[in-house]
Amino acid sequence: MMSFAVSNKQVWLLLASLLCAAGVWLYADRVLIPYQIAEGAAHNRPRGNFSDLYPQWMGARELLLHGRDPYSPEVTHEIQEGYYGRALDPNKPGDPKDQQAFAYPVYVVFCLAPTIRFPFETVRRGFFWGLLGLTLVTVWLWLGVLRCSVPLGTKLIFMVLTIGSLTVMQGLKLQQLTLLVAAMCAAGVALLVAGRPLAAGVVLALATIKPQLVLPLLLWLALWSLGDLRRRYRWVVSFLIVMTILCVASELLLPHWIVRFWHAAVAYRQYAKGIPVLEMILPTWWGRVLELLFAAMTALTCLRWFRHAENTAAFAACTCLAMVASVLLVPKVALYNQVLLLPAILLIVRDRRTIWHGSAIKRFMLVVVCVSLAWIWVASLVLAGLSFMVRAEVIEKGWMVPLVTLPQIPAAVTALLLLHYYRTTFAPSLGQPGVVECLG
C-alpha cells in the first residue's frame, strides 16, 4: 500500500535527486553535445536530425504510403539524407560508419503507422514526451512487480533519478525505441503478476520489435511456464497467436521480409561494430569466457526457481536476471540499453540490507554498484557546474569523465545478483509475503 505522507528526509532526498537529474541534463546540453558538434565539425562529419526514430519512421512511411522496400539501398540513401543531412560517402574517411539503415522487423511499421502522415519534427516531439511518460510508468510497474512497499516520496525519487540517468537521457534525446521496448517488458511482466496472461502475451509479442533485447526475458518466461504448464500456458498461446498475426501481416505487406530483415541485421552488426560490453572492457577471450559463465549461472539460477509462482520473490529475481542478461549479452554497447537494468537496480535497493549482511564479496560488489552509479551523477553535476565558469573548449575535454563507470555497471549488477540470489532460499510460493519494504 502506498503512503502519501512525505517525511523531511524524503524531501531532502527528492531535492538531491532533482539536483542530480539537472546535472545530467545540463552536462548533456552544455558539455557532451557541444563536444560532439565541435568534433564533427573538425572531422567534417555530417550532422542532421540525429534521431534514432527517423530510420524506422522513414522506412514505415515509404512502405505504407509508397509500397517501397524499407531495406532497399534507395530508402537507406534517403534515410541517411534525413538522419545525417546527406548520404554517407564511403570514400570520405570522416564519415560515420553507422549506415542508419532500417534494421527492424517489418511489423514495427504497424506501431508507427499512426504517425507517418505527420511532419517528422511533430512526431519527434510527440515521441519524446510519450517515451518520457512511459519511462515514468515503467518505474511504477517494476516497483509493483518487485512488491516494494514505498511511500509516494520514495517513488518520486526513483522516477526522478531514472529520468535523470545518462541512459534514459540519451534514449529520450534520440527518441530510442529501446525505451518503448523496456516499457512493454515491464507491462508484460506486470500483467502476468496481476493474473492477466492473455494481455501479457499481446504486449510481449509487440516488444519483439527489438528481438535481441527481449529474447532472454522470453526464454526465462518460457521456462517458467513449464513449471506449471496447465495454469501458465495462456500467455504463451496469446504470444504465439499475436506473433503469427504480425508475421503473416508483414509477409503480405512485404513478401520475404524475414530474409531481408536477417540480412539487414547482419549488416548492422558489421557496420555498427557490435560487440557485447564484456568484450569491450576486457580482452576478447576473457570477455567471452565471462559471458558464458554469466549466461550459465543465470540459466542455473532460473532452473532452480522456475516452479515458483509469478507473485513470488523468486520469480522477480529471475526476471531481473533475464533483463540484465539482455544488456550484458546483446552484441552492441549502447548507453540507452542500460534502461533494462532498472528492475535489477530496484531489486538491489530493496534487498540492500540483506546483501550488506551477507559475505564480504557481496558487500564489495554492492559498493562497486553504488559507487559506479553515483559517479555518473556526481561527475555530471561537477562538469555542468564548471561549464558556467570555464571556457567551453576547456570543459569539453572532460566530456568522457561521467561515462567512465558505465561499461562495468551491467557486469557488476549481474555479478551481485548471481552472488546473492543463486544461493538464496526462497520460501514456497504460498508462503511469500504480500509486499516487501523497500525504502522508508
Image (tube, rainbow, N blue to C red):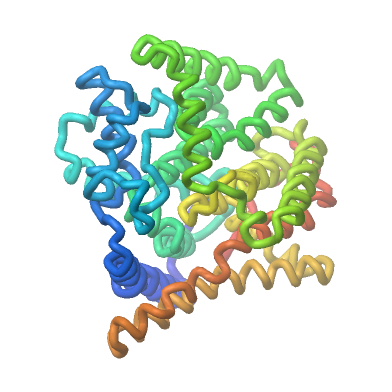
> Is residue 277 positioned above or below 237 on the image?
below
In this view, the residue in front, 351 or 9, is 351
Q: Residue at x 37, y 27 (%)?
A: 71
Q: Dividing the picture into quarters, in which one does residue 416 lie? A: bottom right
Q: Residue at x 73, y 49 (%)?
A: 288
- Residue 86: horizontal and vertical position, in percent? 23, 47
Q: Residue at x 65, y 34 (%)?
A: 310
> Is residue 103 positioned above or below 98 on the image?
above
Q: Quadrant of the C terminus?
A: bottom right
How many callouts does the rendering have? 0
Residue 28 seen in render: no
Residue 138 seen in render: yes
Q: In this rendering, would 52 be left or right of 327?
A: left
In this view, the residue in front, 328 or 132, is 328
In this view, the residue in front, 152 or 45, is 45
Q: Dividing the picture into quarters, in which one does residue 307 lie? A: top right
Q: In this rendering, would 438 be left or right of 258?
A: right
In this view, the residue in front, 417 or 82, is 82
- Residue 75: horizontal and vertical position, in percent? 28, 31
> Is residue 402 positioned above or below 271 on the image?
below
Q: In this rendering, would 76 be left or right of 376?
A: left
